[in-house]
Image (spheres, rainbow, N blue to C red):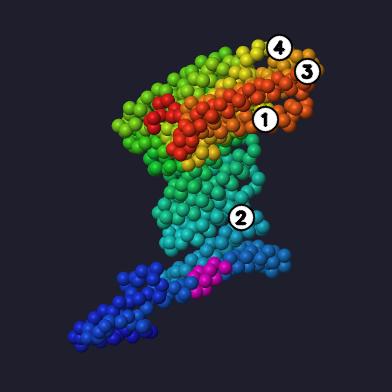
Amino acid sequence: MADLERRVEFLERRAGDRAPAPLPVEPVQPEVEPDSSAPVTLEPAAREPMQPDPLGVPIAASTQPREMETRIGLTWLNRVAVLTCILAVAFFFKYAVENEWIGPGGRVALGVIGGLACLGLADTLWRRGHQVYAHGLCGLGIAILYLSIQASFSFYRLLPQPPAFVLMVLITAAAGAMAMRYASLAIAMLGLLGGYATPVLLSTGEKNIWFLFSYVLLLNLGAMALARRNTWPMLEVLALSGTAVLYGGGIESTVSAEERLPAGLFAVLYWMLFLSGTNWAVVYLAHFLACVAAMVVWEKSLAGFAPAMFGFTAGLLALCELRKGLAAPSVAFTSFWICYGIWRAFFIGDPGLEGEAGLLTAVFGLFLAWTPLRMALRGTRTTERDLVLIALNAIFFTSRIYTLFERDYAGWRGLLAVALAAVYLALARFLWTKPTGQRDQPAVELLVGIALVLLTLAIPIQLSSYRITMAWAAEVASLAWIASRTQSKPLALGALLVLAIALVRLISVDAEMYLTGEYSLLANARFLTFLVSGIAFILSGRWLLPAWPSLPVVAATPYVAGHFALLLGLGLEVEAWASRTAAPENVRNLASAGISIVFALYAVALAAAGIATRTRINRVLGLGLIGFVVAKLYLYDVWELRLLYRFLAFAALGGLLLVMSFLYSRYRRSIESWLHDEERPFPEPPGNPRG
């Protein structure tokens, strides 16, 4: 009323040729901008200073509580009322059947009349401006018609299946038309629910897969058209859900030879239809379900499974380029390997090495070429998501293809590693010079790192099982080098994860080698494994710590792990030497004394290296190791060793302690001056640009 009074006052002033002056309107809620159609509050121009009208509250602010009230009182109560009436009609049919009030034909006729009456009344109210109320009545009428036709077939057997099915299809089509007329998502969803429920409600147990899947396809076409025209993404969700339920029920658990063609054909058609949708969640889920369908339909046929999976994967990657779906490559990669893994695990019989390897190679090449092709088409550079996909593609393909080759082509696996490394190097060269004109350094370094790992694996791949640990150690070094060059923390964390796995294998598996039998001291596979792993870990630490000086503990973990691996390998060699040298009663004494001496020598070497290269971590590790040896000597050796071995251990350790003490005495001033300067944690690795 206050707004209307101000409007009348404004018009009267205009009619009397009075010059009004507008007053600023201060909203009650500052975060809501006043609408341009809000009332204008005017006062005489002579009034100074101009003050906001205490009643000048915009309509938008004053109507917010009323909007909430009408939303609850009209929309939500209307929806609850419709649902209540639908249940009431269903209970009425059931009660009428139990009490035999009227004949079956009369009951169905009443339902049809009631449904049509609701639709007519809804249209009348909609034309009179009661849109929300009309939507509820329209939904009620559609539901009553569905229930009536379903009751005429299932309860009373008044209609055979074909006419009942046609009537329910017509009701679904009418619901779609009314949803478009009234622009109502609720009516469209109700009509689609009835449409997808029709085959279930009118099922007689007979299986007609061609008819069922054709009906679902037509229903999906209508749902996708409605969703696109009215921007209703929820219809796509409903359509995909209904399709998954009816398709799964149609093919059940096992697909016969006669059903394989329609099941595969309609899986492809549904996949193509849903990939044209606007909801990316539906697109990705539809792609995954299509891969699952291929896995089920061609459960025992590689000839059908392979082209279907390759086509689905390539299609989603193409869609990513056309519609800029950033997560599409990840979804395609994950869907393929999940479905392929399940299919291979439950496949009955042998699909054949050539066909299976061909499928894996084709998909591997597809993802490997995806990055340069995308760059060539779009002129962009690789993202972190692309780098992760390149690395995962190499890991999954290499591990699986080696398993396939192990049975019949074990002697070719080293050559296969060399061939794969050559492919990665060629791709790295391509990215180094093309196609954007700017070098994509992260991608190039990742590809080169993968190639180096493969080349490293080519030699030990033909040897015994310890090659696995060496491969992991080489991977740690490669990831650490790439992470230091690209400043990629995810790659650094990946290097630490592989490092942990390699350490567990070193301790639990490789350390158990040569428990019995003769072998050459130091020149054996076990010590080679510990030596290569230790060097790889040490190099990883040298690369990581200069790149992340703010995280010294994390970055120094590989460096410490490398020295631990070397010490463990040396300790195992000392034990083996003692077991073959001393009498059985003296083996433990000789081994313990030998380990103390070797560890002390290693500590002195670390301290000397730390002084020579001005690296604090080497000196700290040397002091820590010598402290461990001293503690071992006084807490264990002095009580457990025999007199001769006790003398040897104490004499050697005493001499080495004097050497270390002399080093600190000789270079004391230099070390103290280094501690006051910015001392490097490690000497710069060769080739590092920071040098």
Q: Say which amino acid is labelled 4.
A: Glu
Q: Residues within 10 Å of mark 1 (few under 14, many from 20)?
A: some
Residue with the most extreme left position: 17
Of tags 2 and 1, the one toward the viewer is: 1
Look at label 3 and name its amino acid. Answer: Asn
Residue under label 3: 586
Q: CA distance from mark 2 to mark 3?
A: 98 Å
Dot 1 amino acid type: Val
Q: Residue at x 52, y 36 (%)?
A: 555
Q: Which residues are magenta?
A: 69-80
Question: Which numbered disc covers residue 630?
Answer: 1
Mark 1 residue element: helix
Residue 480 or residue 50, whichever sits in front: 480
Query: Is there CB contact under 8 Å for labels 4 and 2?
Result: no
The 10 Å Cα crowd at callout 3, few under 14, some 14 to 19, many 20 or more, is: some
Q: Which residue is mark 2?
A: 159
Q: Closer to the N terminus: mark 2 or mark 3? A: 2
Position of residue 106 relative to residue 273, above or below, is: below
Q: Please tell me which of labels 1 and 4 falls first in the chain.
A: 4
Residue with the mark numbered 4: 518
Is 464 in the magenta? no
Q: Quadrant of residue 507?
A: top right
- Residue 448 percent location from the top left of the image: 44, 26
